[in-house]
Image (cartoon, grey):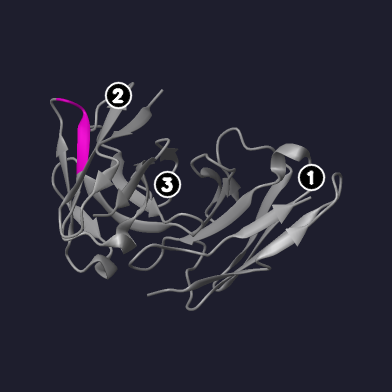
Amino acid sequence: QLQLQESGPGLEKPSETLSLTCTVSGGSISRSSCYWGWIRQPPGKGLEWIGSIYYSGNSYYNPSLKSRASISGDTSKSQFSLQLSSVTAADTAVYYCVGQRQLQWYFDLWGRGTLVTVSS
Amino acid sequence: ETVMTQSPAALSVSPGESATLSCRASQSVSSNLAWYQQKPGQAPRLLIYGASTRATGIPAKFNGSGSGTEFTLTISSLQSEDFAVYYCQQYNNWPRTFGQGTKVEI
């Protein structure tokens, strides 16, 4: 049974680059039938899709992030990572890593989420 | 981008009653619509995909319907564990977008 777990700093300074890692257990990110992605949720607000990748390299991003987001995978560690550059207070949110089985575009696997606060 | 509008923003229901939640898309999303349930402090959970197909392990009390731009999630015989925030999400157009949520409360 696939399980996802986010890890990374809980506090970032403005203008820095946020870096989070998702570890996939119970399987490999090189499963040929999964996309892996990130979704965020500002405190008390709704959900925003950030982007998703396929292990072989194809990637898809929300243009609202204006190219600040980058997602990459490490098949040897069964991990994938999010980097979000030039963060501001508006990037404060709970960040969820997600899996999309059967190469679908609904999100059927979720990590527990990790809160990242952007503050000086 | 496709804007997803959910109504109402909040819905008060008594245990045992049914709840009907609506989701409207600013442009057609065909049947590429999912519903999620989120309880406080938890990650969302997939309930419905393809507008009407229940995800694995989701009880039959959750029913989704609609296509194009109008969608409905009906929850029958609400129990305490069903009180949560429900989100719709379209996956027909780029970028993938969510509604702002409907809070179902006692």
Name the amino acid, label 1: Leu
Q: CA distance from mark 1 to mark 3?
A: 24 Å
Pointer 2 and pointer 3: residues touching (CB < 8 Å)?
Answer: no
Residue linked to disc 3 = A107
Give the quarter of the figure containing the N terminus of chain B. bottom left
Number of residues whose C-alpha sits closer than 10 Å to that of mark 3, classed few (under 14), some (14–19) or many (20 or more): many
The residue at the point 36 percent across, 51 percent down is A39
The kind of secondary structure element at disc 3 is loop
Q: Earlier in the sequence, mark 2 or mark 3?
A: 2
Q: CA distance from mark 1 to mark 2?
A: 35 Å
Name the amino acid, label 2: Gly
What residue range appears in magenta?
A: A77-81
Name the amino acid, label 3: Phe
Chain under disc 3:
A
Q: CA distance from mark 2 to mark 3?
A: 17 Å
Name, please, the residue furthest toward the front: A120
| Front in this rendered view, residue B38 or A24 | B38
Which tag is nearer the camera, tag 1 or tag 2? 1
Residue B1 as seen in the image, left or right of residue B90: left
Residue B51, above or below A104: below
| Front in this rendered view, residue A24 or A11 | A11
Residue A27: which disc? 2
The residue at the point 37 percent across, 68 percent down is B93
The residue at the point 61 percent across, 52 percent down is B85
The kind of secondary structure element at disc 2 is loop
Residue linked to disc 1 = B78
Chain under disc 2:
A
Residue B87 placed where, x, y %? 55, 56
Residue A66 as seen in the image, left or right of residue B106: left
